[in-house]
Amino acid sequence: AWEEQKALREVMVFLQTYGVTNALCLRIVKAYGNDAKKILMNEPYKVCREVEGVGFKTADKIARNLGLPTAGPQRVDAGIMHTLEELEGEGHSAFPEVGLLEKATALLEVDYSIVQDRLKVLIKENSVCLLETNGVRLIQLRAQENAERSITASLRRLTQTPSNLPPIIADKAVAWAQDRAGFTFSEAQGQAVVMALKNKVSILTGGPGTGKTTILKALCDILVAKRVKILLGAPTGRAAKRMHEATRVSASTIHRLLKFDPSAGGFTANTENPLSVDFIIIDESSMLDTKLAAALLRAIPGTAHLLLVGDVNQLPSVGAGNVLSDIIQSNVAAVTRLDSVFRQGARSGIVTIAHGILHSDAHPPHPVEEFDKLDFAQDIHFLRVDDPEKCVQKVTQLCCEILPSKLRL
């Protein structure tokens, strides 16, 4: 303990000029023990690779102050990896080699050829992956490739393992759910319920107002009646809350479902400790990035059914990957596409315009320039403002004055 405290004090004194927090200093000492200061002084880029929270820029500042070579392999390799990580954070699961080299060269401020040579070494050492698509060479982080391979393996495992559901006569179950709902489902809605019951992996996709919620409610009613162990999840708390309100079945975020452990930096639920579930439904699946999807699929037991629900035409996830669209294109899952707008959706201006955009037939409301011209009986408005600064003023006024007054908030 005394040795660790001594090492911690040395690291804190050494890093105090770099704005590194005490908590991060402790993490570095836990990773390297008494060698922490020596590693920081000799291999600062090793720390940014191996200790979460230490970024390339901090390591680079340390290295430059210590006089380490700016074009040395250690720095160039770290710069390439940092650039790839930044691109992944922007949503790229892989990036064109030429573009990566240009960005890394600009970051490092060294000759292009030096970066090019080091990238070849990283590829040879399997530190990064080289892909080729339509004649374009792409570079991908190894962790991203591992996640993609994990998704493929998990989907294969799910589709090839027999179901654990009790016997369910799908057509009779749909008729029972219709009676319970008090209205007749469309043909596509009924088929979607049957599809989810008969297939181990299925996808339900459609725009707003197309009846996805009706299908979820019917499916949950059937599964609850059959005493099936079901789990509902979504990428966000808001989406999970909507699932619960629609189905009256408990729902949670995927992170909570998988029991995220901050101290371990991972999920408690995994291949060795799978979820206790027979049927799992994930809503807003277009928001799933590759790594979260891989973790989720690993935690689902092979005997369970998986239903992914989402709008494939929405923007993809913030993180890297376009999981829902890619699974649909892979043909590994049974897919139901909904395109008819029902009931309240048909009366919604937002829903109408959303579907109009998809079919290149959008008719936005007539633009107005003053608040008193807005029709608050409608759910969508077009307030025309040409100047960016005036736009900020109008939005502020709308949120602070007009909406509270009109909507009695």
Image (cartoon, helix red, strand yellow):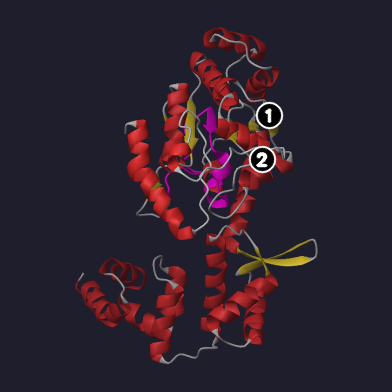
| Left or right of residue 300, residue 22 in this image | left
| Identity of the residue drawn at 37% across and 38% down | 403
| Identity of the residue drawn at 68% across and 29% down | 339
Quadrant in the rendering for residue 319: bottom right
The quarter of the picture where the C terminus appears is top left
Q: Earlier in the sequence, mark 2 or mark 1?
A: 1
> Amino acid type of disc 2?
Ile
Residue 101, percent from left and from top: 64, 76
Front residue of 245/210: it is 210
Residue 87, percent from left and from top: 57, 65
Residue 292 belongs to magenta span: yes
Residue 204, percent from left and from top: 63, 31
Which portion, as a residue range, is magenta? 267-293
Q: Which residue is mark 2?
A: 357
Mark 2 to mark 1 CA distance (whole Å)? 13 Å
Q: Which residue is mark 1?
A: 339
| Identity of the residue drawn at 38% across and 81% down | 40
Front residue of 30/142: it is 142
Q: Check the image and name the residue furthest to the right.
A: 135
